[in-house]
Image (cartoon, coloured by chain):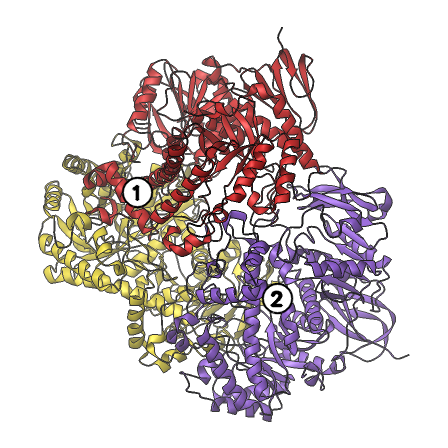
Chain colours: A yellow, B purple, C red
Amino acid sequence: MPSLVDLTSGGLLYGGDDNPEQWDRATWRDDVAAMQAAGVTMVTIGVFSWALLEPERDRFELTWMDEVLDLLHEGGIAVDLATPTASPPPWLALEDAETLPMDAGGHRLHHGSRTHYCPSSPTYRERARVITQVIAERWASHPAVVMWHVNNELGTHCWCPRCGAAFRDWLERRYGSLEKLNAAWGTAVWSQRYGAWEQIAPPLRAPYLLHPAHTLDYRRFVSDTLLELYRAERDVIRAVEVDKPVTTNFMGFFRGVDYRSWAGEIDVISDDSYPDPADPEAPLQAALTHDLMRSLAGGPWLLMEQATSAVNWRSHNVPKTTARMRQDALRAIAHGADGVLSFQWRASPTGPERFHSAMLPHAGTDTCLHRAVQDLGRDLRTLAEVAGSAVRAEVAILFDWSSWWAAEEPGTPSDRLRVLPQLQAWYRPLWEAGIGVDVVHPHADLSRYRLVLAPQLYLLDDDGVANLRCYITSGGCLALGPFSAVADGNARVRTGRFPVPFAELLGAGGEEWWPLPEGGAGLVPANSSGALGRGHADTWAEHLRLEAGGICELRFEGGDLDGEPALVRSADDSLHYLATMLDAALLKRWILGLAARRGVVAAHPVPEIPEGVEVAQRGEFTLLINHRQTAVDVPLTTPHLTMLDELEPTDHVHLPPGGSTVLRRALS
Amino acid sequence: MPSLVDLTSGGLLYGGDDNPEQWDRATWRDDVAAMQAAGVTMVTIGVFSWALLEPERDRFELTWMDEVLDLLHEGGIAVDLATPTASPPPWLALEDAETLPMDAGGHRLHHGSRTHYCPSSPTYRERARVITQVIAERWASHPAVVMWHVNNELGTHCWCPRCGAAFRDWLERRYGSLEKLNAAWGTAVWSQRYGAWEQIAPPLRAPYLLHPAHTLDYRRFVSDTLLELYRAERDVIRAVEVDKPVTTNFMGFFRGVDYRSWAGEIDVISDDSYPDPADPEAPLQAALTHDLMRSLAGGPWLLMEQATSAVNWRSHNVPKTTARMRQDALRAIAHGADGVLSFQWRASPTGPERFHSAMLPHAGTDTCLHRAVQDLGRDLRTLAEVAGSAVRAEVAILFDWSSWWAAEEPGTPSDRLRVLPQLQAWYRPLWEAGIGVDVVHPHADLSRYRLVLAPQLYLLDDDGVANLRCYITSGGCLALGPFSAVADGNARVRTGRFPVPFAELLGAGGEEWWPLPEGGAGLVPANSSGALGRGHADTWAEHLRLEAGGICELRFEGGDLDGEPALVRSADDSLHYLATMLDAALLKRWILGLAARRGVVAAHPVPEIPEGVEVAQRGEFTLLINHRQTAVDVPLTTPHLTMLDELEPTDHVHLPPGGSTVLRRALS
Amino acid sequence: MPSLVDLTSGGLLYGGDDNPEQWDRATWRDDVAAMQAAGVTMVTIGVFSWALLEPERDRFELTWMDEVLDLLHEGGIAVDLATPTASPPPWLALEDAETLPMDAGGHRLHHGSRTHYCPSSPTYRERARVITQVIAERWASHPAVVMWHVNNELGTHCWCPRCGAAFRDWLERRYGSLEKLNAAWGTAVWSQRYGAWEQIAPPLRAPYLLHPAHTLDYRRFVSDTLLELYRAERDVIRAVEVDKPVTTNFMGFFRGVDYRSWAGEIDVISDDSYPDPADPEAPLQAALTHDLMRSLAGGPWLLMEQATSAVNWRSHNVPKTTARMRQDALRAIAHGADGVLSFQWRASPTGPERFHSAMLPHAGTDTCLHRAVQDLGRDLRTLAEVAGSAVRAEVAILFDWSSWWAAEEPGTPSDRLRVLPQLQAWYRPLWEAGIGVDVVHPHADLSRYRLVLAPQLYLLDDDGVANLRCYITSGGCLALGPFSAVADGNARVRTGRFPVPFAELLGAGGEEWWPLPEGGAGLVPANSSGALGRGHADTWAEHLRLEAGGICELRFEGGDLDGEPALVRSADDSLHYLATMLDAALLKRWILGLAARRGVVAAHPVPEIPEGVEVAQRGEFTLLINHRQTAVDVPLTTPHLTMLDELEPTDHVHLPPGGSTVLRRALS
């Protein structure tokens, strides 16, 4: 199987999306020269070229692309060649309006933008096949091409009748019979029992709430359908060419698609990452997302898109400083990326993205931004040996798209308990401590982890339950967050004391979920664990009852649940259940305490991380970022080389404001 | 005429919605046993059973329901048998898409939820008739069945062409001729004069504001049309069976339907009440709504649905404590309910309401919640003698759905003057004083009331004017709130000094409505009535001029209206007009002052109600609720028995935090 | 060419919209008498009369209007006769549903309101032509009629297929070939290259952002199409009658139409002005809008609609005091209006505008409001000699609808940099100083202005660039605001250092736009210009680099751009570029400093304007308004007469709170 390793023997990849169809030939030549000067090694070509490659049905104009590929190859720039199927040309919408998607109200959307395709449309699928075949046959053996890039940010949702028909086929495969579907969905509620398959539609706009199992299955169906699009194009390519890896670019924690179920089909896990420079949470969110990508890949992955500075699609687009651009790139590397590509190489003066930053901005090469792009290219060359190295993680965070979808359907006890904020809150103490974390599915082999966290795992199917019970009883340690394991694989609420499949192991059981009124409640340590200290519970609580074997660690103070348990563990310390949302300080004490009890240690050489300094370890390499407004000195446990700046071993690092560096242990 | 009295000879009703179609036979048996243990006397069956009773057109599966009814009857549980027409089965939508409703944009909504029917659809009406007939014929004589429950929360709005045709018929009946309609609606405005009936449509989405008389009449039409649905099913039932009362469950101050116009057609006024435990205004709102229901019924009514704890349809669903559950139930009884039923008996693990609380929660019978359900059943049995007793009310609040609709159309001077908040503000002093209040229509016989309040009565037709003038001139006392009597029955603004029909009686007249800028204005007593004290006016004011006979009680201080009258009364004290929104303290002084001058006295035995204690009187029975976080002692004027706890007469009551009790005067 | 001068030989016009179709004949007579008593000289008739004049297709009822016109003429009231085409009668919607407009989602809107017409509908256009012809032929020679009023607030947008076809024709005329269109729009972006004209649609709802050149051209097309409607009706009138001016009423800075491109076709520029009495910015906004109208007219204009008190279409409609009504009317006069008309003469008791104020309110003639209306009529007669006089302006503010449209498309660096707020911020210091300002297009002859300001001029086509460069190099002085001259006439971003066409003249060039995070940044004067003092930058900044010849006046302090230039000027002081948004005080120092350096002096006689006093000068006449809560004395440089109150010359004016007066220089 081709993979990312095939591309990174020369070191880390560097480059971006190139859109030669927007420029004249003279610019193509200038670009190759500027790419070389910036240390670019690979560019993505063709993402939005369909209308240029096939200006009308079955009339292909390919020679301009020949020329582009030749030029790049001559310049030593490798190519990630995209199928252009993310944005059909206008003629396709005119030829068959049913290639356009419908919204949940049953209204067609129109062309003139991008992603205007119905994933179930036979016409769209056939034309996507044809253009992919043309491209594969023409350029599979071109020496510039080193990777295939299918579509772009696959994620279009559609609610049209044709998707409805495909959904019914999908349901028939899933359930086998209507009886099983009716039972699984609980259609006896509100008289929505289906008497024939054709009575089932996509979850269209209705007078009131839809059945949550219906909407959940539609999300699964859409994810599977989009994966079919990927597979179809990949198979067309594979039929022509078998040695080059195929990718499609992900969008991090994108809600529309279950990337976990896709990962096995994709040779190179690649991701688009756009942390908001104006958001202080963005570095943490980026790190967590990178850990997800590395976990999906089972090793190195590729940062396929990022911004060198501002994006254009927020309402207020704060740009990146050059220091910030470098931080973001190095963070990705430290969390397992083997390359950093940006959208885009040269800024477009037209179109909706005319104010999206680029490696080569509107103002040209003689700019701070472009010089920083060149500097980063040089830095990445210096870090070549990082490519391929592994990140050690002894802690896993559980995450599952189905659970995310089901947890955030309407009609839960509170829409203020959100999955990603919970993940981020639990991840924070580990990230701040520079401890490596994987983000894995509840079905994953957990035996390698000393500690497994499930900050919010509303839906957990029976196999997941079995896997987690097996992990616990085999010496593992699981910490479950509030409102977890509530629903089974069909989003059916498990009845009994919760967390139903774990209550007995835990020695405690819940009676009622208990969203808190404004102001929350206090938290006090139970006798057994004064070390956690006092704190505050907000937004969410649950009414638990301690039973034989359970040990209470925190109790509510004040409010309706005064004196009731808030944090409980099993007597053998293998299972922990938190029935509320802790303030950040208490959450940190609890999670780092668990990690310490489980022997989790950070792999990096920084004994005391100063506040505002970010540390990440990948193999032998340590990334340090100073987020403070002032310089900081960071002592190290052993002498290290600062790879990017100087090569003298040192036992402490000086970081200016915004400074970032990569260390490597000095050979003693 | 059958009525609620037929059902309450044995005391107060207790129970909830039961959904046996969601459960297996073993659970049915468990349920009957648990109902008996909880003191349940009646359950509602069949609300969402259509797809189970008629899985395809004209194929009926009825034996499972036979079995359910038999089991319940054997267990001594009476049944309120519902027609299942609130949620048609999927096959009906497939058979005739025009059974589905359209929104105001002209877009069809879809099935998969509930209430997906167009009330004008002949197909829907015919199928509703058929299933109702099947049910009536099958179970009219079943001994378990004691009441009929038509549809559920009737309130679906539709703007489809068929509703348009029905609307035109309704208009022809109402106006007789197009000329009269054009005159009534004022269609000369904006060139919308209709030249033929077929030119009139429902108030569909238009480029700008619609004519308010058009939208008002459409609301009246929809209310009448939904009442037709009720009548049609009731008549089918009556044709089979004549001795058991028929109900349909209301939704309190539901804006979609004029329940006043419905009340005469319904044997048992029943209501669904879901006060939000997180809202400190909820107890007052619940009490006011209960008073509306009692007034609609002209006596006892039935609390058909409430929640034992949390609901699922708010964004953040704070649960009820068991103390709160008891408070809410006893408040309904104290305001005239002769039974307390909950949605629902057993919590559903699937469907959109999977997190709605129930009498029997997901966690089972061994829970605090279920034990409190059992305790409440016991309490209600203890209070059996309350059933049928009357609430004395010497004060009436005027309320009219047409006026509510018209007052909150777009294009008024301010959308911050809202009807329900005004009602609640004026009700508060009376509720806090434990004074009984009826909520009646302006056409009602008012002669029995010492004081009549019209906090916001924007629209008042000529009959209403005549009725109120008659009341005033016959010795009554009317207090009119701001922006009242502005429009006539067709929502036409009356020209002249306002309140036009009363200005002469009042001795003052208004020139301009005067929404206040942020900050409002001060209020000072006029010489004649220093006792009211100073206060603050917010949001709304009016520019009044005192004329012969009027007496000014409050004047504005500061702002554009500095020195102008804010509160005026007629010389004979029979008519009061408040031209602004008072701060709560001043409003209380004014309203309780009026009540005292009119000889209104509370019927309860609490001479001094401590703050945070709620008191309500029904016949011989007094409800006390302690809303405080601390215990309180409440002295009584005469010795009373505390019915639920002990039976020794006492002249003061001790209430713990959250505590509630029912007293009965001790026989001396 | 007929013009406003033809109407104002007798002095300033006074009156309002009259809607006799809503009233009976007796009221018509009362109205004429009341108009006479109020000093009304002209009323607008017929705006919403279509359904009354043509109750069904080709059946005309005209005699009632004969009678109205005769009555008004007998009463000495002139008539501005409207075509009724702004609100088609219901029968037209029934006859051809395609006369109704579609929204951007492709959904038809409905009748029942107003402006429910598709401007491209042949049926609508034909029926508009017919009714206009009937009216013109019937009343062109009626002695009451002195002006024609085409349609009303022309501004309806539509996205229907027929508009699509017309859009394609418009594009073909504009671009000549698809190649040119594809190049201009940059359709190579996102694969939206058009291969045939019929592939181009209106900018309908799509899955993501549309091409900004596409949406910009659609706005231009809509504006041109609406102008076609105006022209068509005007030409019908002109074919019958050539001596009376034709107008259509504008809506100030209305975003939907490029009034600049319309102005040349309209004999009398007339405007509808509804400043919000609750908004402290409203006086400034009104003054700026009046200056725009005067600039469009190239002299006097007509205030066609205003409110005597509250409007009905805001959510909270604070009324005007009578002092405020007078202020608003006199301000319009002082900024060049030769008449003040109100919507409407008599308040309507029905319809969506039943709570819009009028000259004759619901409460009748014996009201404060109506007396103030009469007083204003008297005041305007007193000011007759003001009619026709000119406003001197030495400062111009550049404004262009295309630039406004393009600047506020999605996808810019920040949606917090808005065009009108920028205009208002820069206008404020001049308005507060009573300095006359014109609002002109970048193509205008600028030679007469000492100072030209471009607060926000995102789009500037090549002709505009040439015009401004010519102005600068011919001795002018131009101050460019942030993000100006970014795009060319097709909304294509100019590449290079910005402001690209001016960077060389300026001696500085920008690299990156730099929206600021919350908190903004400090500003400090550069050495060369300490006089500006320190200040604060908010929301927006740019990364500039000083080059040969440029002089830095302000630098950023703190934040990412610490020490970088914020305000730069060319060495010869002819060009200034502000790269941020200044706090109000610093902006005032800068703009008034520029004005002083350029020798701009106020024409009014107030040497020191007290805070809260508004001054405006028109010819010999000075308006003073006291916005303070307290009285104020205003010293004058030379003795003046106060025209409305007394006639003794005075060298200072006393203004009570809310007071306003008009002065005229005393002949010495």
Q: Chain of mark 2?
A: B
The three-letter code of the residue at mark 1 reads His
Q: Residues within 10 Å of mark 2 (few under 14, many from 20)?
A: many
Q: Nearer the viewer, residue A450 or A182?
A: A182
Relative horizontal placement of residue A439, taking residue C308 as reference (left or right) = left
What residue sits right under mark 1 in the picture? C214
> Residue B449, image x and y in percent?
80, 65
Asked if disc 1 and disc 2 are in contact, CB closer than 8 Å, the reply is no
Instruction: Work out whether residue A10 can be spotted.
Output: no
> What residue is shown at x 49% (from left), y 51% (from top)?
C113
The three-letter code of the residue at mark 2 reads Asp
Q: Nearer the viewer, residue A312 or A78?
A: A312
Relative horizontal placement of residue C358, taking residue C235 as reference (left or right) = right
Relative horizontal placement of residue A293, taking residue B377 as reference (left or right) = left
Q: Nearer the viewer, residue C101 or B63?
A: C101
> Residue B267, image x and y in percent?
65, 79
Position of residue A225 relative to residue C517, above or below, is: below
Label 1, label 2: how many angstroms apart (C-alpha)?
49 Å
